[in-house]
Image (tube, rainbow, N blue to C red):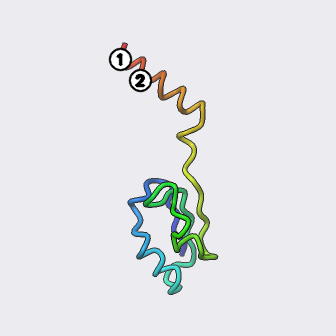
Amino acid sequence: MPLLNTARGGLVDEAALYEALTSGRLAAAGLDVFEQQPPSVDNPLLRLENILGGSAVAGIRNEALERTGRGVAEDVL
């Protein structure tokens, strides 16, 4: 069974995840977020072959920032 987390990094205990992945109790994991953003280069999860890690970047695109700014301005007005 795999684990997929695209919500918040703090929702997954990374030490427990590492143990589950290396022991075979969990087949694989896909993480768009980590406890520390961006993840440290020495994060042991990044050395595993049964993990797919990404970087949560959707919120920093220009379009997302513009929508956020526009929404805040509308709320203030």
Q: For the view shown, which residue lies furthest in the bottom direction?
A: 23
Name the residue beneath numbered marker 2.
Answer: 72
- Which numbered circle lies on residue 33? none
Quadrant in which the C terminus appears: top left
Q: Find residue 60 and report its horizontal and vertical position in percent.
A: 55, 39
Nearest the eye: 54 or 39: 39
Q: In the rendered image of this protein, does residue 33 appear above or below residue 44?
A: above
Q: Helix or strand or loop: what does disc 2 sit on?
A: helix
Q: Could you classify mark 2 by the number of other residues whose Cα lies within 10 Å: few (under 14), some (14-19), or many (20 or more)?
A: few
What amino acid does circle 1 point to?
Answer: Val
When asked about the image quadrant of residue 32, the answer is bottom right
Q: Helix or strand or loop: what does disc 1 sit on?
A: helix
Nearest the eye: 69 or 30: 69
Q: Is residue 12 left or right of residue 3?
A: left
Quadrant in which the N terminus appears: bottom right
Q: Are marks 2 and 1 in contact (CB under 8 Å)?
A: yes
Name the residue beneath numbered marker 1.
Answer: 76
Q: Find residue 28 and report its horizontal and vertical position in percent.
A: 57, 74
Q: How many marks?
A: 2
Q: For the view shown, which residue lies furthest in the top direction?
A: 77
Q: Could you tell me which residue is drawn at 51 percent across and 60 percent down? A: 39
